[in-house]
Every structure is written in structure tokens, then in C-alpha cells.
Image (spheres, rainbow, N blue to C red):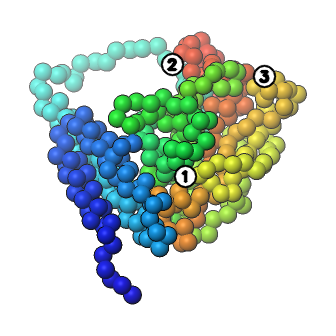
Amino acid sequence: MSTETPAWMADIDSAALTALGAIEAAATLATLREAEVGALGRKGNVTALMKRIGKLDKSERKAFGAAAGGLRGKVTRAVSARREAIVQAAIAAELADTTFDETLPGLDGAPGHVHPLSRVQQELEDVFISMGFSVLDYPEVESEFDNFEALNIPGWHPARDMQDTFWLEGGHLLRTHTSAGQVRAMHQFKPPFRAVFPGKVYRYESTDASHDHTFHQLEGLMIGRHVSVGHLLDSMRTLLSAIFKRDVQVRLRPGYFPFVEPGFELDISCQVCDQKGCSVCKQSGWVELLPCGLVHPNVLRAGGLDPDEWQGWAFGLGLSRLVMMRYGVNDIRLLMGGDARFVEGFHPGT
């Protein structure tokens, strides 16, 4: 067996030296952001390495993908560690300010109400924690790699046309789905593991009773050696029974999503109209709740895992739509409308 070092290893080492050096040298969050974009942005040197996989000989792709994916994970962890160090340094500087009097009383305010989105999210987190899942939090501003490339959605893929996007400077964007956290989690945790990560997502699209440009999702991911669709369905039934306090009718349809194979659409019977037909379900009696399926091998590779050794399932739950079903809300725009009167209608115990 040949032990000769591949020619591309020098490129891996060079990219690592440049990226990690810039991160270590960053003294502010702004310069750290520049270093992160320079490595993981759309035109970053680490991102450029990932895009070379398809141009290599088939015999080299697996080793190159593992090396490049491992570097990306190392850079991600280095950014997180440096960010924490910068923030802690800033906090220490503030605490050293002797002009602040921490003994002054705070300001009294009127009692508020928990937003229905927050309430349902907390309940969901409790359900998944009881099943052994970790609850993670990932950035709403994502790199093109995490939001698309790592999820098996390259630049030429038509799935990008379905997610008109809010682009930012430096190759970043507002994430279009919580699925962007999948590869982050694979780099962060040693398998096997299971986790959920809730949060806001953004899409540049027309709004109506069931669509908004800003809404909430909850991503679920389970990585193990022997994972099946049956495990996924059992978790979904447990979830829905806990939220609705009763059995809820669901249906599973085949669906195509680049980051899962096979992929499915899980629909829930409309709880607003009791399947009689309304604007929320578009008169069908069913509401699309979540896409799901087994994690695509290319996504596992992007996460630095060997698909011959590890498997996984994932889902992206429409948290905003679940809240609508739970409380009979007939327009999704009410959830993010900023009207305090809407929130005041949800009292503790509802």
C-alpha cells in the first residue's frame, strides 16, 4: 500500500495555516468575522477546497472530503473559541468599570405574557430532552456552505430557486432553514448523538395566511450506526401526542429534498377547520408540517463522517404552523406582527 502524501495535502495545510492564523490574530468581533468569511464564506479558502471534491479522481474523493471537512470543523471550533474569548475579555473590561452601581433597584414593569411560539418551543424542547436529545442554538446568519453546499445543494441546483434568499455582505445570508445547523452539529459532537435546534428562518417570498418571510422551525437530527425511518416516525408520533394532548392524524408522502434520501413530507390534519377546508390548509384539510428523511451520504461526508459507518435521520418542523394548529390561529402573520393584544390573549395554562 502506498504511503505517499497526496499532492492536495499541501493545499489543506496551507489553508489551515492561513485560516487558523487569522482567527488567532483577531482582536475584535469585526476582525474575527472577516477571518471567518475569509475561510468559510462563499469565496473563502476552505470553501474553495470543498468545491474541489467533484474534480478529483473517485479514488481520492473520500480522503480529500474527510480532510477538507475536518479542516472546516477545526476552523468552526476555532472561531467559536476565539469569539468566546473576545466576549469574555469585553465583559471583564466592563466589570472593571467602577462607575456602575449594581446596588441600584431595577425598574418595575407590567407583567407580560409568554408568546405562543415561545411556549410551544419550550414544550417541544422538554419533549425531546425527555427522549435524550440535546437542545442547540446556531446562528441566524449563515455561510453559503452551511446553508446550501453542505446540504447537497450546489450553486447550480434548482432547489436554490425555491428559496429566494436575503443575502448579506461577505458571502453570508439569513438562513433559509434550520437544516443549516446539521453539519455544524456533526462537527461539534462525536457520534452517536441526537439533537434539536430551533430558531427563526428567513425567505424572500410573498406572504399569505400560511406563508411569511420570517417564521420559526425546529430541526431534529439523530446520528447513529443503525438508524431507520421507523425511529423517525416514532419520535414524530411522540412529539405530536405530547403537544396536542391527543392522537393526531398524520400522513407520510414521498418528497424530494437534496439533503435526505429517501425523503418524505409529513402532513397533519388541519386543526383549525377540523379538515373541513380553510385558508390555512388551502381547502385540502391537510397542512404540511415537516419534511424529513434519512440524511444523505453527501451531507454526512460534509460533516466529516463516513456514510459507510454512520447513518442518520433529520426533520425540519414548521414550528410556526404547529403553533397555528395548536391554538387555531388562522393567519401566520399574526405570530410576528408585533401586536401586543395578540400575545395578551394567551394566558398561562393555555
Distance in Å between CA atoms under marks 1 and 3: 33 Å
Q: Nearer the viewer, mark 2 or mark 3?
A: 3
Quote the CA–CA distance across marks 2 and 1.
43 Å
In the displayed structure image, the side of residue 6 where residue 263 appears, left or right: right
Q: Quadrant of residue 88?
A: top left
Q: Which residue is denoted by mark 2 in the rendering?
A: 112
The mark lying in front, picked from 2 and 1, is: 1
Residues at marks 2 and 3, CA–CA distance in whole angstroms: 31 Å
The label shown at residue 152 is: 1
x and y, in percent, of residue 300 in the image = 52, 60
Labels 2 and 1: the sequence-earlier one: 2
Q: Position of residue 191 (x, y in %)?
A: 48, 64
Q: Is residue 264 above or below residue 309?
A: above
Residue matched to label 3: 279
Q: Earlier in the sequence, mark 1 or mark 3?
A: 1
Q: Residues within 10 Å of mark 3 (few under 14, many from 20)?
A: some
Residue 118 in sight here? no
Q: Nearer the viewer, residue 233 or 177?
A: 177
Check residue 36 in the rendering and tell me which mark sits there, or answer none: none
Q: How many marks?
A: 3
Mark sitting earlier along the chain (2/3)? 2
Which structural element holds mark 2?
loop
Callout 2 amino acid: Gly
Which amino acid, mark 3? Ser
Asked if the residue under mark 3 is in contact with the one under mark 1, i.e. CB atoms within 8 Å, the reply is: no
Three-letter amino acid code at the position of disc 1: Asn
- What residue appears at the point 76 percent right and 41 percent down from the top-left corner? 267
The C terminus appears in which quarter of the rendering?
A: top right
- Look at 69% across and 57% down and name the residue there: 262
CB under 8 Å between discs 2 and 3: no
Q: Position of residue 215 (x, y in %)?
A: 57, 29
Q: Residues within 10 Å of mark 2 (few under 14, many from 20)?
A: few
